[in-house]
Amino acid sequence: MTDGDELEARTVGPEPTEANDRPTAPERLPVDAVETFLRCPRRYEFAHVQGLEGTDVDDRPLEDRVALLRTAICDALRGVGPEPGERALLEAATDRLEALWADYDERFHSLTQRRHERRVLEATLEAYVDAVGVEHAAGIARLNDELDADGALIGPELPLSSRISIPDETHGTSDAVSIDAAVDYCYADGSSIVGVRFVPTLRSLGLLRYRTDWEGAVAEAFTDHFDPDADAFEPSFVGALFETSVVLDGLRDRCERLGLEDRTCRYVQIPLAERSQTSVNWVRETVETSLEPIDLTKPYIDHHTYGMTHEHRNRTVDDRLERRVASLAAGDVDPTDRWDEISSEVCPDCEYAVCCGDYVAAEVRFDG
Ligand code: SF4
């Protein structure tokens, strides 16, 4: 975004109160607000305290198409009978996509492009059914039978939240902030309940895409992000681990309320717009693609905490999440501590640069 007019009002977070002259903690926050805070605390302030929402118009069509697929798949999973075959599930999802596509009003350059994008979406449905769809539908049926839930654990956008306590040592009180996340459906897999979230791509996960253990490279990269001497800045990677912590805690809470407290929880992301996996034959007008879901539980859990709690947790990540939420709730939004990384890696693409005093002051210094 390049124009301040494209900023629009949104929810307002912490505000100073006369009683204690410190910001009151927000009662709830989406988990992506915490990731924004990691990226740049001033950006968090613009988006979630002052209520200005940046509009990243470039990402909108991609997200809208993923939303179509998300709805088509969830409706198909809800509508087909228990344990459908590949063909029945694919037909249900494709029919639903066709109905959604008829009302889809994205502006394409030409009819040819519109037809091509539809073929990409259909190929993605096929890849989903082939990779995991039938297995997940069977797991949903098992869960439905067990709970008599009748599709209640199929979204899209099933809300989950994790409550984080923030002690206020000065006033001897504590606030709690609910961090909100969502999954698109849950299914049973052995002794686990798995939350599945459809995302556009897995690019932002960085190292998490290639590692299946916390111990070693993942733990080091996480610790380095918070070490001022380590010269590391990985907000997306750290944000994904925070999101995993929030989703797993939210799933545990749901399981407890459903009488499933003996289950462990897992969090899987499925990318639906990973164009690097897609091949197009322009002569035959065909598209092929494949999906590679990722189980974020594996690089998240640390075996020491698991041994102590028998739950999929990571004390290092959870502690850091609490500390970041405490900073955020205290209104600690000065980006100076990490200015070198923020100014070189975040400011160049920031929607708020046009109204950001830190950025403008740095530019003036540079020009002068
Ligand atoms: S312009 Fe830079 S300092 Fe200002 S909010 Fe954006 S990322 Fe943060």
Image (cartoon, grey):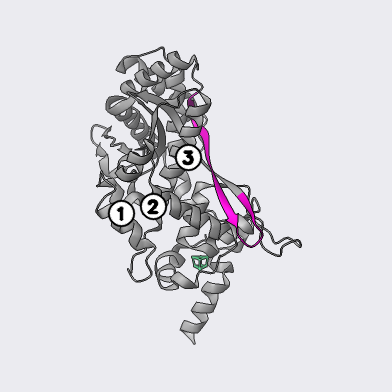
**What's the amino acid at mark 3?**
Asp
Mark closest to the chain's N terminus, 2 or 3: 3
Q: Is residue 190 above or below residue 202?
A: above
**Residue wearing tag 2:** 316
Residue drawn at x 45%, y 60% is 39
**Residue wearing tag 3:** 64
Q: CA distance from mark 1 to mark 3?
A: 34 Å
Asked if the residue under mark 2 is in contact with the one under mark 1, i.e. CB atoms within 8 Å, the reply is: yes
Q: Residue furthest bottom?
A: 368
Q: Quick check: is 168 in the magenta stretch?
A: yes
Quarter of the view holding residue 137:
top left
From which residue to which does the magenta span run?
153-175
**Residue wearing tag 1:** 219
Q: Is residue 323 left or right of residue 226?
A: right
| Mark 2 beta carbon near ligand 1 (under 8 Å) | no
Residue drawn at x 63%, y 47% is 27
Q: Secondary structure at mark 1?
A: helix
Rendered location of residue 31, percent (x, y): 50, 47
**What's the amino acid at mark 2?**
Thr
Q: CA distance from mark 1 to mark 2?
A: 9 Å
**What's the amino acid at mark 1?**
Ala
Q: Nearer the viewer, residue 359 or 265?
A: 265
Quarter of the view holding residue 198:
top left
